[in-house]
Amino acid sequence: MIAIESLTSWALRVFCALGFLFLIAPLLVIVPLAFNAGDFLTYPLAGLSFRWFDALFFSDQWLVPMKNSFVIGILAALLATVLGTAAAMALQKTSTKLRAPQLGIFLAPVVMPVAVVALGMYFTFVGWGLAKTFPGMILAHAAMGAPFVVSTVSATLKSYDERLYHAALSLGAPPTLAFRKVTLPIILPGVLSGALFAFSVSFDDVVIALFVAGPDQRTLPLQMLSGMRENVSPAIAAVSVIMVILAITLLIVINWLGKKSGQGVQRV
């Protein structure tokens, strides 16, 4: 019996390792190409060089889209965090029967095909005069990121004792002060995790940007797509490396925040 369990455990480990290798293999292929001294994405490498990273950070062709991606991503994440946190707290006070359908409405942008959402946003924003503008891009990405904030904050609120908030009110604290001093510190890891998810969604988006963005709002993924159509250069691989490093960093921070959230709940 013990031998069978041990064999099953090793088989599961091998299966997980193969699955991980399958997922990570494209990254292992693209990373060396970012340091290729040649002018094309080909193996074997012509040599090792940082020339494509220089082109990335010292050329307006890449620097402007990178700046747009960070500006739009940060502002969209801030807006999504405010809206998502407010929605999650409202859902927490909603009756159990109404909570599930309302949560489904909030999560609809994630469940529906991105192309359908992007098309709807395009026609809506054209009517509002927001198409091909920075506010339009920020609103569109905030709408896509808010459901992730709702999910993470709702998960944190499940372990939150609302009596702490009412106790602060009974001691004379105004509602805003009670929220800032009592509620927010407890749910802050979930709020920050949702904000990072929202930023990641905005930074990686290409479908919505294709519909909503104009020439002045070109983001890094859009520039990569355009570069692949016009001239495939190792600069695209350099951009990919930067985005992979950013994604790994966000995942590490989100995992750390998740542990902090659990510790906070235990202390409460």
Image: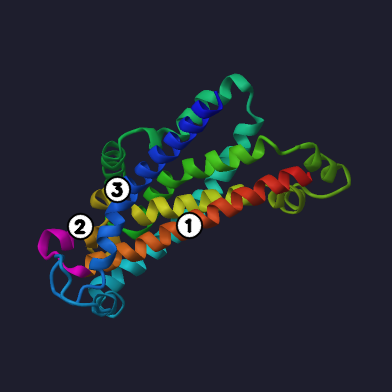
Foreground mark, 1 or 3? 1
Decide: few, some or many residues near mark 2? Use Cα within 10 Å; few <14, some 14-19, many ≥20.
Answer: few
Q: From which residue to which does the magenta span run?
A: 226-234
Tell which circle, 1 or 3, labels the residue nearer the N-terminal end. Answer: 3
Asked whether, in this view, residue 85 is left or right of residue 54, the answer is: right
Kind of residue sitting beneath label 1 = Leu
- Compared to 183, does 231 lie above or below? below
Which label is found at residue 225? Answer: 2
From the image, tell me which residue sits under label 3. Answer: 208
Decide: few, some or many residues near mark 3? Use Cα within 10 Å; few <14, some 14-19, many ≥20.
Answer: many
Residue 219 shows in this picture: no
**Magenta stretch holds residue 228:** yes
**Residue at the limit of the structure toward the top, as seen here:** 97
Residue 64: percent from the left, percent from the top? 30, 71
Tell which circle, 2 or 3, labels the residue nearer the N-terminal end. Answer: 3
Residue 170: percent from the left, percent from the top? 87, 42
Which label is found at residue 250? Answer: 1
